Each structure stands twice: as C-alpha cells, then as structure tokens.
Image (spheres, grey):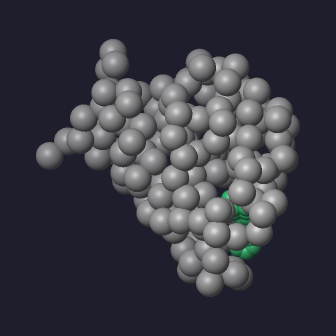
Amino acid sequence: MADATSATIYVLNGPNLNLLGTREPETYGHATLADVEKLCAETAQQFGLSADCRQSNREGELIDFIHEARSKAVGIIINAGAYSHTSIALHDAIVGVKLPTVEVHISNIHARESFRHHSFTAKAAFASICGFGIDGYRLAISGLAAKIGARAST
Ligand code: CA2
C-alpha cells in the first residue's frame, strides 16, 4: 500500500440499520449505528486508516457509495442488510469496483430463516463475517487491513 496513513475505507450499512439499538436487541444487541460508526472509526485509526461511514435505506444510493469508493477508498466493509439476500445489483457494483471488500452481518444469518442464508454480497466479497454482533465490524476492518498491508500502530 502506498500510504497507509492517508488511506480511507468505506463502511457501508444498508436498510434499517439506522434502527439499531431501538428494537430486536435479542438479535442485534443494544448498540446503535452511532456506536458502530465510532467502533469503526477507532478500529480503522489503529491501522492508520480512516473510516468513511455511510448508511442508506436505498439500494441505488448504496450502489452510488460503492462507485464513489472506487476513487476514494482502498477497501469496503459492507453490511447491506436485507439487500444482501436479494441484490444482484449490489453484487455487480462490488465486483465492478474491484476493491477488497468484507461483508459483515451482526447476526448469524445461517442460524436464522432460510431466506437469509444466501448472500449475493458475500459472493462479491473476499471475506464474510457474521454472528459476532457489532464486534464483526472490528474483525472485518482488521481483516481488511491485513489484506491491504496496513499495520496496526502500537
Ligand atoms: O445481521 C445483520 O447484520 C443483517 O444484515 C441485519 C438485517 C437483516 O435483514 C439481515 O438478514 C441480517 C436487518 C437490519 C435491521 O436492523 C434492525 C435493528 C433494530 C431494529 C430493527 C431493525
């Protein structure tokens, strides 16, 4: 990697994730989206990276964010919410920008309803993390940092 100190990663959250912490704590925990974004910013900083966090309830806007990442970011963390299970368009956008991408799910999608078992975004990502709660974002950033050669600062 050219300059880890100035590199940005995009952290993208999809539909309904703005509601984190308001209900379904048994599935998603008590943390809010603001907590997730703080965790991501702090974790990225540990690797000399900067996290640009976005959330949208609209598929097209998420695609726009992915396209924007092509020129502004060195990698993507994405929790596309329910679009993970439905959106070939998001799959194609991730494949198209050719950035290393990690998919995150807060819950263990494989232990839930069968319609959540398949993920189009997972097919486009180099790695997928699910079931660790919001700690999955930290793990994903750590894995992405290793992939792009960003080192943890002491
Ligand atoms: O486990 C995940 O991170 C999911 O991506 C969350 C999505 C769900 O559709 C995926 O199957 C798995 C849903 C996010 C909705 O989050 C809410 C949180 C609190 C209250 C309402 C919705």
Q: Nearer the viewer, residue 68 or 84?
A: 84
Q: Residue at x 73, y 50 (%)?
A: 118
Rendering quarter of residue 50? top left
Q: Is residue 87 left or right of residue 71?
A: right
Q: Position of residue 146 (x, y in %)?
A: 33, 35
**Residue with the most extreme top position:** 2
Q: Residue at x 61, y 74 (%)?
A: 28
Q: Residue at x 33, y 15 (%)?
A: 2
Q: Is residue 22 above or below residue 107?
A: below
Q: Position of residue 148 (x, y in %)?
A: 38, 27
Q: Nearer the viewer, residue 137 or 61?
A: 137
Is any atom of residue 56 visible in this view? no
- Image quadrant of ligand 1 equals bottom right
Q: Is residue 98 above or below residue 34?
A: above
Q: Position of residue 99 (x, y in %)?
A: 56, 24
Q: Is residue 39 above or below residue 146?
A: below
Q: Position of residue 152 (x, y in %)?
A: 23, 41
Rendering quarter of residue 24? bottom right
**Residue with the most extreme left position:** 154
**Image quadrant occupied by the N terminus:** top left
Is any atom of residue 22 visible in this view? yes
Q: How many marks?
A: 0
Q: Is residue 42 left or right of residue 72?
A: left
Q: Residue at x 69, y 40 (%)?
A: 121
Q: Is residue 132 left or right of residue 24?
A: left
